[in-house]
């Protein structure tokens, strides 16, 4: 096999692919150069996973990469009908983010239960004001999304004594199907959105679903911003349909500075950082290098995305 | 047995002792009336556990309560040589606060690991700034204090994947003795103070011990303020000897508004609330009623404090 051409979608050269020296001809491009580079690449590494350039630049016909890897769990930013219809294999960064995101969700749940944002506000005002807070052991959570991230979240919340139900695309052992979702939402203390963005999940957290939740319920989204109808969430918070929320992902990222979400009552806004623990870039690089070596050796690739569904199926 | 007199140290009558109607003559007093009431009381319930009035008012000789119960885990606010030397039994609220405090410590650890205070600051400024945060699984904690609260903390941190060592008054199975403390501090990512306030523990977290800790270490105190030399902690934070801290208890409570601790860098200040989840007052009341019924029936009391040591010994 001749030395394959690896095209990296990222504005800057990566220091993490050194092990591929001699095994790949590595080219870099930013979004504007992508369409011109794609036809001569064997492999595309989508390192800048915030870019939606692949959807625009993917060639309808003619030469194109045989394999696309994205350094992210979600693939919504690159999937398009032409890529889905092609024989190009798509892989993702499954596994890297599970534990960090589970910890991040636990941090948000505990911060809300223990009224930590208010504590920090009172600290700024040098005000000592004792309050009672919530015990989380014995409360109930629903995690929507039954992939490795959702399961890691359920495991971590369970370890904290929270009774946790998982909801997936279809019912299976230990996972509820969508038909149970509304019933589970109506009795949950914590609702965690951890689903991939697909046609089925887009906008699933809308006014009707926030209306089903308990006034004491709190909502967390670490999946994709488009899972949530943001205006409906802002209204649910303003009208006290639910007690609080935390968003790490948004319809538009970065969240524009004039967005009303920054100051919505009882809402924690964080900048899409839930999975990004120190060293994450190195882990993503090492994971890709390992996949690349498998691919060159002709071995079956791990983390292959079902392009119709938009995620890696199965356990 | 004639109807015993129960004296409640609290400014306001308690709505939680209804079950004792007919079984006790209940009197209330505030701190100023305590000395006058004590000689005719059979039982003293220290409901206002922030008061140090018992130390001042306890009679040196003559009639006095045969039993003192405090609605708190610590007994440092009421112990004095005369009480220690007397045959009066002292009990505490052992058990009520374990799980809430363990959750609170987990909330603080996760908030610091995930840089949540900075996230909330940036939110206030409507600024989107992605940062990397810390994974907690695989990190190391030392919990100083091996009573039920310390053990609950160790259990909860362990459930989150943190390798946790307990340090107690003396080495026993699963518990390190004080001789291991400095060595454990030097390699801990998290140091949690959960010890009772005694002659041995007063001021134990001083400049020398903060100097032993790693620059990346974070310190949490949910025990008693006097465990910590506050000036030394402020200096350790200012000089970056350690990376952060969270205090829920202080030498002086409420923390005076001119205390420099309110604005110490990387310090979370909260108002002695770690154990106080919704319903805690009812739980404390129910626990006392149960103890009272045992006492009237002549059964051995639970939660009896070793007045020399200053806590309930044993597992």
Image: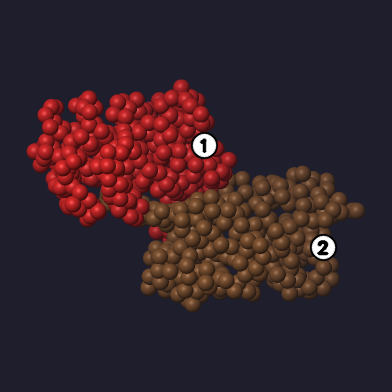
Chain colours: A red, B brown
On the image, numbered disc 2 is attached to which residue? B66
Residue A163 is situated, as x and y percent measured from the top left of the image, at 55, 38
Note whether A58 is above or below B60 in the view shown: above
Q: How crowded is the residue under tag 2: few (<14 C-alpha within 10 Å), some, or many (20+)?
A: some
Which residue shows up at 18% across the image and 41% down it?
Answer: A1
Are both tags, 2 and 1, on one chain? no
Q: Nearer the viewer, mark 2 or mark 1?
A: 1
For this view, does A201 lie left or right of residue B294? left
Instruction: State which chain disc 2 sits on.
Output: B
Is there any visible trace of residue B197 in the rendered image? no
What secondary structure is found at the residue carrying circle 1? Answer: strand
Mark on residue B178? Answer: none
Can you see residue B67?
A: yes
Quarter location, residue B7: bottom right
Q: Horizontal placement of A309 versus A102: left or right?
A: left
Q: Is residue B118 above or below residue A222?
A: below
Of residues B151 and B223, the one nearer the viewer is B151
Q: Return the residue found at the far left.
A: A36
Q: Quadrant of the C terminus of chain B?
A: bottom right
Residue located 53% across and 45% down the image = A159
**At x 82% / y 59%, what residue is drawn?**
B42
- The numbered disc on residue A164 is 1
Closer to us: B257 or A159? A159
Residue lying at the far front in this picture: please name it.
A1
Q: Gap between marks 2 and 1, in whole Å?
A: 48 Å
Please identify the quarter of the rendering in which residue A297 is found.
Answer: top left
As displayed, is residue B103 above or below residue B194? above
Q: Name the spot of residue B216 as percent of width and height, x first.
A: 40, 65
Helix, strand or loop under label 2: loop
Chain where mark 1 sits: A
Closer to us: B224 or B158: B158
């Amino acid at each position: 096999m001749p030395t394959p051409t690896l095209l990296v979608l990222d504005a800057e050269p990566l220091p993490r692919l050194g092990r591929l020296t001699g095994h790949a001809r590595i080219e870099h491009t930013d979004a504007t150069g992508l369409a011109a580079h794609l036809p001569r690449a064997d492999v595309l590494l989508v390192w800048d996973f915030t870019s939606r350039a692949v959807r625009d630049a993917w060639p309808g016909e003619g030469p194109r990469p045989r394999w696309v890897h994205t350094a992210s769990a979600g693939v919504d930013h690159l999937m398009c009908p032409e890529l889905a219809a092609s024989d190009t294999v798509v892989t993702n960064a499954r596994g890297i983010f599970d534990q960090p995101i589970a910890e991040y969700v636990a941090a948000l749940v505990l911060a809300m239960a223990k009224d930590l944002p208010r504590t920090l506000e009172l600290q700024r005002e040098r005000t000592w004001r004792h309050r009672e807070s919530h015990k989380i052991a014995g409360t109930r959570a629903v995690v929507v999304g039954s992939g490795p991230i959702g399961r890691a979240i359920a495991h971590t919340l369970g370890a904290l004594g929270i009774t946790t139900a998982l909801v997936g695309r279809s019912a299976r052992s230990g996972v509820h199907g969508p038909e149970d979702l509304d019933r589970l939402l109506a009795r949950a203390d914590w609702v965690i959105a951890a689903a991939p963005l697909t046609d089925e999940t887009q906008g699933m957290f809308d006014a009707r679903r926030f209306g089903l939740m308990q006034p004491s319920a709190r909502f967390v989204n670490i999946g994709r911003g488009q899972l949530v109808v943001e205006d409906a969430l802002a209204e649910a918070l303003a009208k006290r349909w639910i007690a609080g929320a935390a968003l790490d992902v948004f319809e538009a990222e970065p969240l524009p500075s004039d967005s009303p979400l920054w100051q919505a009552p009882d809402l924690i806004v964080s900048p899409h950082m839930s999975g990004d623990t120190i060293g994450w870039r190195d882990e993503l690089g090492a994971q890709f290098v390992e996949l690349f070596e498998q691919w060159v050796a002709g071995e079956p690739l791990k983390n292959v995305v079902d392009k119709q569904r938009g995620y890696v199926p199965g356990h």
